[in-house]
């Protein structure tokens, strides 16, 4: 059950794009085409998987003070290897993704999972977490790309769709259209996944000045608010 939760949380509950709002730049830039979205999602998932595995395996060896630079070096090495493979075997995809492929090095999703999960958990759990987050990232990318390509270009995976090819909304393939679709998907995720932000209670208990003011200040503020 724990393994299943670690995997599924990245798809819906903690989707890195639609819930945690991470990896926004590659999401908006590469989601104009389903093929590009699949390529970016696959590349990021591979890097995320191996970086989580390596960081989890080395978590007791890497000194705490230099852990972030070490993470970046590991991730950069993996991204370089993935980029070389894509250049060798998928040159068209490499050209389409452009600068966003090497920029996986600084993708917040990968560095975030390294710091928040892989650094504290075993190798197997870290690998499952990486796969879940990777699938969630790819899912969000492909969902955005499907909407933008179908209605913005009138095609799907480069295949022309009758009627839509002559009546497409070109702005959806541009930056404003990307932000529009992105916002709609975030709203839908919040609605159907029932993701609600935690309420933060404010009061004297969490105030560092409570002992100095004798808790009188909070009462005054509350009274003033009620009078207004």
Image: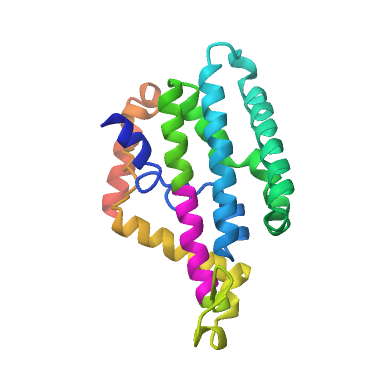
Q: Residue at x 62, y 16 (%)?
A: 65
Please state the horizontal and vertical placement of residue 140, each as a whole percent of the image.
46, 55
* Left/right of residue 101 with respect to residue 208 in the rendered view: right
Q: Residue at x 53, y 12 (%)?
A: 60
169 w.r.t. 123: above or below: below
* Left/right of residue 178 with respect to residue 83 in the rendered view: left
Q: Nearer the viewer, residue 17 or 128?
A: 128
Colour scheme employed for the rendering of this structure: rainbow
* Left/right of residue 34 with respect to residue 204 in the rendered view: right
**Label tally:** 0
- Magenta range is 136-150
The image quadrant that residue 111 belongs to is top right
147 w.r.t. 121: above or below: below
Of helix, strand and loop, which mostly describes the magenta segment?
helix
Q: Is residue 182 visible?
A: no
Please state the horizontal and vertical placement of residue 209, each as a whole percent of the image.
41, 26
């Amino acid at each position: 059950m724990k393994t299943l939760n670690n995997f599924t949380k990245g798809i819906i509950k903690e989707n890195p794009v639609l819930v945690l709002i991470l990896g926004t730049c590659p999401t908006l830039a590469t989601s104009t085409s389903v093929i590009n979205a699949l390529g970016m999602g696959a590349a990021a998932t591979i890097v995320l998987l191996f970086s989580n595995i390596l960081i989890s395996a080395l978590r007791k060896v890497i000194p705490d003070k230099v852990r972030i630079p070490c993470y970046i070096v590991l991730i950069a090495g993996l991204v370089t290897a993935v980029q070389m493979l894509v250049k060798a075997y998928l040159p068209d995809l490499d050209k389409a993704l452009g600068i966003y492929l090497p920029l996986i090095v600084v993708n917040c999703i990968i560095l975030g999972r390294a710091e928040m999960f892989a650094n504290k958990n075993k190798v197997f759990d870290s690998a499952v977490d990486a796969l879940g987050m990777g699938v969630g990232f790819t899912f969000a990318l492909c969902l955005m790309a499907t909407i933008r390509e179908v209605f913005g270009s009138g095609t799907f995976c480069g295949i022309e769709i009758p009627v839509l090819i002559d009546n497409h909304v070109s702005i959806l393939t541009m930056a404003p259209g990307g932000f529009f679709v992105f916002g709609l998907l975030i709203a839908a995720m919040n609605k159907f996944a029932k993701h609600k932000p935690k309420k933060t209670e404010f009061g004297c208990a969490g105030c560092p000045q409570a002992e100095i003011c004798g808790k009188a200040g909070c009462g005054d503020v509350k009274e003033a608010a009620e009078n207004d």
